[in-house]
Image (spheres, grey):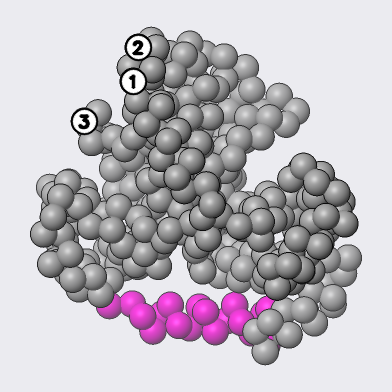
Amino acid sequence: MPADLVPLSSSLLERLAALGVDVGRVLRRANIARSRFEGSRARVTTAEFFAFWRAIEELGSARDLGLRLGGETPAHQQHVASMAALHSPNFGEALKRLARYKRLVCPEQITIAVVRGEARVRFEWLLAGEAPPTLLIDGVFASVALITRRGTGKLIAPRRIELARRRAEEPMLRRHFGCDVRFDAPVDLLVYEAKALDEPFVTHNAELLEVIVPGLEAALNEGSGARSLADDVRSTLGQRISGERPAVEMVARSLGMSARTLQRRLEELGTSYQELLDDVRRRSARRLLANTDLDAGEVAFLLGFEEVNSFTRAFHGWEGTTPTRWRASQSNSERGALP
């Protein structure tokens, strides 16, 4: 598994404070000690990082806070993956470098799929037990839009954004991204016209890339053994589940091996294809039921179940209750947690 370390820098806390956020109160609510910021930056777990952003949301921050943080990041505060992206020759190469080197910053995976004239960019937190906070998704999407604007020197709006959440703040999101916004989506996606990938970057700096890329590649190679085959299967399943049950042959082919080899290697790791599929389906079901208004039948379809009764039985085996009752219990818990 990748290291569960996410940077939470003191400069971010300073920016939040400048925007009117009571940082001390946020840290207390998220149960993160202020003393962890005595050095240049703190490293927190994914769960702590999510708790930090949820605390900001729960304490009544401005709804555009994530957009402002991601869309107004000073150039000198960008992480190494964003720097490598910004100095790429074009938008497509920038996304590839962002996806490749973001793994050095935190356990977040970026995938870019070109489908039917669209470039679909997805961000996945590999060690998350729950859906990413809304402000965090807004900030990540805004940061990509910022790289695109700085790199090309012009505004290139996405075709649309798809959000795995209930409809909220639609006018604000439309204004910021300049595109259509779809809610109750299976996953969070930033979607561009495929031809936008060829847009040249005026910030391209081949000499600088020659300096920084070898170090980034060396760091990747050092951590190459941290990710297991089971992690790769989970990630592939998360990308492929959408209205059908991904066949083991398809997943194996995408990983460059036969189905028999994949199953044998998973057995050596003490797991199986079916166990990993069930794990991905369970996590996806919880996320969709908790954060969208999709009904149980729609969730069942998205997770590749042939009928809603099969999904209901599977969910009951996972959680000990029905999808409808689980969703209601989550809503009651959220109301009880409000300050």
- Circles 3 and 1 in contact, beta carbons < 8 Å: no
* Magenta segment boundaries in residue numbering: 321-339
- Kindly indicate whether the residue at mark 2 contacts the one at mark 1 (C-beta within 8 angstroms): yes
Identify the mark nearer the N-term, 2 or 3: 3
Residue 281 image position (x, y, % from top left): 70, 66
**Amino acid at circle 3:** His
Q: Which residue is depicted at the point 33% across and 77% down?
A: 338
Badge 1 is on which residue? Answer: 211
Split into 4 quadrants, where in the image is the C terminus? bottom left
Tell me the crowding category of disc 2: few under 14, some 14 to 19, or many 20 or more residues within 10 angstroms, Cα based: few
Residue 79 percent across, percent down from the top left: 31, 37
Q: Is residue 11 visible?
A: yes
User: Height in image: 201 above or below 18?
Assistant: above
At x 68%, y 30%, the residue is: 114
- For marks 3 and 1 on the same chain, the one whose residue lies earlier in the sequence: 3
Name which residue type carries label 1.
Answer: Val
Q: Residue 76 bears which disc, if any?
A: 3
Q: Please report the residue visible at 50 percent of the width from the left and 78 percent of the height from the top.
A: 331
Q: Is residue 326 found inside the magenta-colored segment of the image?
A: yes
Q: Is residue 187 left or right of 306 when viewed as pictured?
A: left
Few, some or many C-alpha atoms within 10 Å of disc 3 (few <14, some 14-19, many ≥20)? few
Callout 2–callout 3 Cβ contact below 8 Å: no
